[in-house]
Image: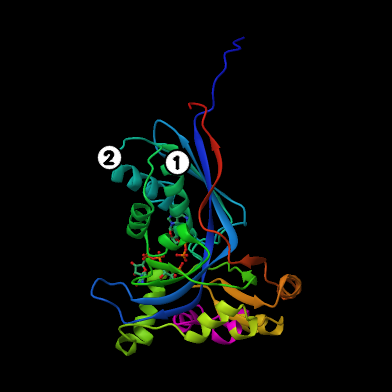
Amino acid sequence: MSLAYEPEPPSVTVRAPAKINLHLGVGARRDDGFHPLATVYQAVGLYDDVTLTLDEEWGVSVRHDAGRPAAIVPLDEQNLAVRAAQMLLAHHGVDGAAAVHIRKSIPVAGGMAGGSADAAAALVATDRLFDLETSDDDLLAVAARLGSDVPFALLGGTAIGTGRGELVEPITDAGSWWWVVVGSDDALSTPQVYRSFDDLVGAGAPTEPVLPPALLLALETGDVGALADHLGNDLAEPALRLLPTLRDTFDDAAAAGARATLLSGSGPTVLLLCSDGSHAREVTAAMAERGHEHVVAVPAPVSGTHVLDVLDTLS
Ligand SMILES: C[C@@](CO)(OP(=O)(O)O)[C@H](O)COP(=O)(O)OP(=O)(O)OC[C@H]1O[C@@H](n2ccc(N)nc2=O)[C@H](O)[C@@H]1O
Ligand SMILES: Nc1ncnc2c1ncn2[C@@H]1O[C@H](COP(=O)(O)OP(=O)(O)O)[C@@H](O)[C@H]1O
């Protein structure tokens, strides 16, 4: 029997939050196929944890903590976490590989940017695992190349998003908000929802969408009634056209006593604004009584992508 000590390979675990859009203003499709946005992102307390372990070759595994996913997460180099890690290494001209493990609680293809969260987490994990010391500006630039929502996943909190959503600016948010997140057994494809927007609104959309000042004021003052009055999502009608059964969830949310109901990004996850934590518990129970299976109460805003654990026996 060998008693030789075999060290664990170095590994880093990073946590990244889901996002919601308190306002999602969408403009007319640009020549590059993207839509100009004026959005207010908020990070909510639902997370994916991504672990990168130094390895000879790339690999990816996923554990779904929130039950059966509504869409498939790729287990090859199409996975956004793997793409992110490879892109950051290439940015630094560094060779290397890692086994990527994702512990998923963010609904897949639900409009909460789970793939973007995984990409953001993988960027931070790669930076730490390979000791790359990437500057914040470079990290945000690589994030933007991976997807429009990835820079916000790095940042967290509450922020304005412009451009195609990749230009992010933190804003004052004095609230301690509670949301009830109602997941769906269905998935909606983001490009398909944007196409549905083109069909419905098309050239009628503004070239430069704007944010409602009253929403920004509601955040500055932490006024839940004002926030409820000024939430908005230009992708809601296009998504409802693709998935009409979403209306039933909106009706149930009103009956369950939500302060306001909002589609999360491109959907189909539905968000119910609550007065406080105990109201959120009541609304969660009321939605479960109405037969909704994936219901969870979450606080917001929460912090962006951050390191949870580092195992580095080499240093
Ligand atoms: C709608 C939003 C709202 O925050 O998020 P989700 O609800 O899907 O999470 C985002 O705009 C999604 O951002 P993300 O999922 O990162 O999109 P990307 O990978 O950059 O783009 C995927 C596809 O969505 C469409 N797209 C995305 C962003 C944008 N401003 N205009 C677009 O038309 C394009 O068809 C693009 O090819
Ligand atoms: N790590 C990942 N996690 C989730 N989805 C991923 C990932 N990598 C690639 N994808 C792909 O991205 C699509 C969008 O997923 P997701 O980001 O969860 O939804 P949304 O864009 O609605 O917020 C999925 O259908 C999946 O094919």
- Quadrant in the rendering for residue 30: bottom left
- The residue closer to the viewer here, 84 or 266, is 84
Disc 2 target residue: 93
> How far apart are labels 2 and 1 at the CA level?
16 Å
The quarter of the picture showing ligand 2: bottom left
Task: Please tell me whether residue 26 is drawn above or below residue 90 in the rendered image.
Answer: below
Q: Is residue 250 above or below residue 135?
A: below
Amino acid type at mark 2? Gly
Task: Estimate the x, y position of residue 179 in percent, counting from the top left.
Answer: 64, 71
Magenta residue check for 274? no
Crowding at dot 1, Cα within 10 Å, few <14 / some 14-19 / many 20+, comes out as: some
Name the kind of residue labelled 1 in the image.
Arg
Q: Which mark is residue 119?
A: none
Instruction: Say which element carries label 2.
Output: loop
On the image, the x and y values in percent for residue 61 come to 50, 44
Q: Main secondary structure of the magenta part?
A: helix
- Is residue 45 shown left or right of residue 314? right
Q: Secondary structure at mark 1?
A: helix
Q: Name the residue that disc number 1 marks.
A: 128
The residue sitting at 39% across, 34% down in the picture is 57
Asked if marks 2 and 1 touch (Cβ < 8 Å), the reply is: no
**Residue 184 can be seen, yes or no:** yes
- Residue 95 picture quarter: top left
Residue 294 in view: no
Q: Nearer the viewer, residue 19 or 210?
A: 210
Q: Say if disc 1 is inside 8 Å of ligand 2.
A: no
Which label's residue is closer to the chain start, 2 or 1? 2
Q: Residue at the location (57% across, 17% down)?
A: 5
Residue 303, position in %: x, y? 55, 59
Asked if residue 237 lies in the magenta stretch, the reply is yes
**Magenta segment boundaries in residue numbering:** 227-249
Image quarter (top left, top right, bottom left or bottom right) of the N terminus = top right
